[in-house]
Amino acid sequence: MLDAAVQVFSRRGFHAANMDEIAELSGVSKPMVYAYLGTKEELFVACLQRESMRLVDNLQAAADPTLPPDQQLWQGMRGFFEFVGAHRDGWSVLYRQARNQHPFSVVVNAMRETVLEVITDRLDAAVRAEGRQAKSEDITAMALTLVGASESLADWLADHPEEDAGRTATRLMNAVWLGAEQLLRGELWRPGQE
């Protein structure tokens, strides 16, 4: 039922989604959908929670903390993009349908906070492995940058089924790793003197 609901919500959006269509696609009666999953709002939240857990689990499972920082980052991004590539409807529901609709945005924001925590922890560990300490706000800013860039590229990937998740992760690594590597070594860009 959740698979059918994600598919319908992805195509139609929350407001235009129809419980009859979800029931038909699920192969059950409409009363059964209500009995198992509750109201349309409760069903949408259940879809969001499942897709959020899938995304976070994929991200965490992909990044092996014993690898060098660049490999951790690349594998984490690849896991993220593999989720998007395999679950385009799920990404659409999370990113396009629920992100800006209260009360559903609460679920998406909680997932995003979890992703930020994972990335922040990994970046902090990478800096410490270099024998340095960074300000927490600098680590947080880098994590936010990575999440924002990843979300934008994932949204693009969702619309391009011919694209490969690994190639997408490599593209983002090429855009961010050279700068991240310098930051890990303590090298900072500063504006020129005026």
Image (cartoon, rainbow, N blue to C red):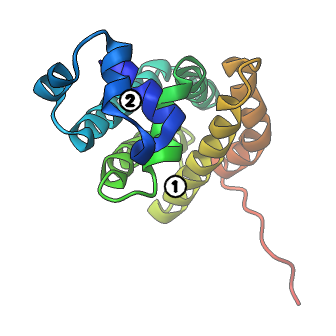
Residue drawn at the location 51% of the way across and 27% of the way down: 89
Residue drawn at the location 27% of the way across and 40% of the way down: 45
Given the image, on which type of amino acid does mark 1 rest?
Ile
**Disc 2 secondary structure class:** helix
Given the image, on which type of amino acid does mark 2 rest?
Glu
Q: Residues within 10 Å of mark 1 (few under 14, many from 20)?
A: many
Q: Is residue 28 left or right of residue 141?
A: left
Task: Give the quadrant of residue 26.
Answer: top left
Percent from the top left, x then y, of residue 99? 45, 51
Percent from the top left, x then y, of residue 153? 69, 39
**Disc 1 secondary structure class:** helix
Compare marks 1 and 2 and give the one earlier in the sequence: 2
Percent from the top left, x then y, of residue 128? 49, 43
Q: Is residue 134 left or right of residue 152?
A: left
192 relative to 119, above or below: below
Q: Residues within 10 Å of mark 2 (few under 14, many from 20)?
A: many
- Mark 1–mark 2 Cα distance, whole angstroms, equals 27 Å
Q: Is residue 139 left or right of residue 30?
A: right
Q: Is residue 98 visible?
A: yes
Q: Which mark is residue 51?
A: 2
Quarter of the image where the N terminus is located:
top left
Pointer 1: what residue?
Answer: 139
Q: Is residue 65 visible?
A: no
Of the pair 14 and 28, the residue shown nearer to us: 28
Q: Which mark is residue 188?
A: none
Quarter of the image where the C terminus is located:
bottom right
Of the pair 77 and 110, the residue shown nearer to us: 110
Of the pair 96 and 185, the residue shown nearer to us: 96
Residue drawn at the location 53% of the way across and 50% of the way down: 143
